[in-house]
Image: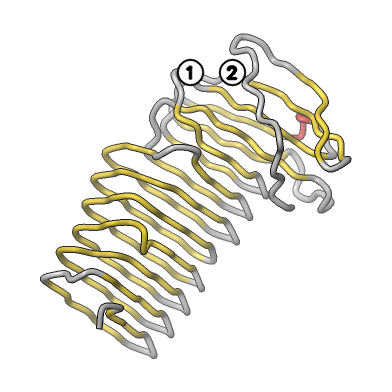
Amino acid sequence: MKRLVFLIIALLCINAVIVAQANTTGDSANIETRILQAFESLQISRGINVTLVEADEPKAEIYIQNASPDEVIIEQEGSKLNIRMKSRSYPDSVAVNVFLHYQNINKISALSGGSVYNKWELETEELMIESGANATVELEILVAKLTINAASSEIELNGEAKAFDLNATSGTKVEAGGLEVEDATIRANTGSKVQLLVNNSLYARIGTGALVQYAGNPAKVESSVTLGGKLEALNE
């Protein structure tokens, strides 16, 4: 699936489900709004692109090209929200974008080619991110504690985090040079590549061809590097 960029983003009625027809580059797109209960944990998969929008009321605005909105399944259990596709495979012409309005969120899981972005800075005390199987996460955040478990995925972060704990494996690429971190604990293996900006302390365990590059001038750096791993200070 490809990420579809729509020229017009409509804010639809908050207390109704509206199905309309839009037009982007000549292709038909269906639009549907679904009202949600408050949630704090999000999981997406199967090529769905989600843009997080902080708002007063939770809802999902679904934009799907060359398929019906019924193909998008949204399941909610307590504070957990799961967005997925009904079937396991779709032609490349099908593209799904969901503008997800949230009040507070502290866990994001992106799997199986899913993508997560945000429209405005995401501010929360603690945030956990899980990504895998060709998922993409691009966020601007302001958090006290950030925890990431990532495999075979790409992550780009900007903003601020006081504490950053990262476990990156299986060729994961983490671009966090725009994320100002005070204290970082990094574990990188199996060809993963990590870039970050750290001010106070860095603890790094690097192995199996992984690369960790850091900017900033942390007062304390401790590392364990094995099996072709590499730690680089970008300031030097």
Looking at the rendered image, the disc whose residue lies closer to the viewer, 2 or 1, is 1
Query: Taking 203 as reference, is 40 above or below it?
Result: above
Q: Which residue is mark 2?
A: 35
Q: Which quadrant holds residue 86?
A: top right
Give the amino acid type for the residue marked by disc 2 in the picture.
Ile
Q: Position of residue 129 (x, y in %)?
A: 42, 50
Residue shown at 35% from the left, 76% from the top: 212
Q: Quadrant of the C terminus?
A: bottom left
Q: Which quadrant holds residue 72?
A: top right
Residue shown at 33% from the left, 53% from the top: 147
Label 2 close to label 1 by CB (< 8 Å): yes
Q: Which quadrant holds residue 16?
A: top right
Give the amino acid type for the residue marked by disc 1 in the picture.
Glu
Q: Position of residue 102 (x, y in %)?
A: 47, 28
Left/right of residue 14 with respect to residue 30 in the rendered view:
left
Q: Which residue is mark 1?
A: 57
Q: Which mark is residue 110?
A: none
Q: Position of residue 230 (x, y in %)?
A: 34, 85
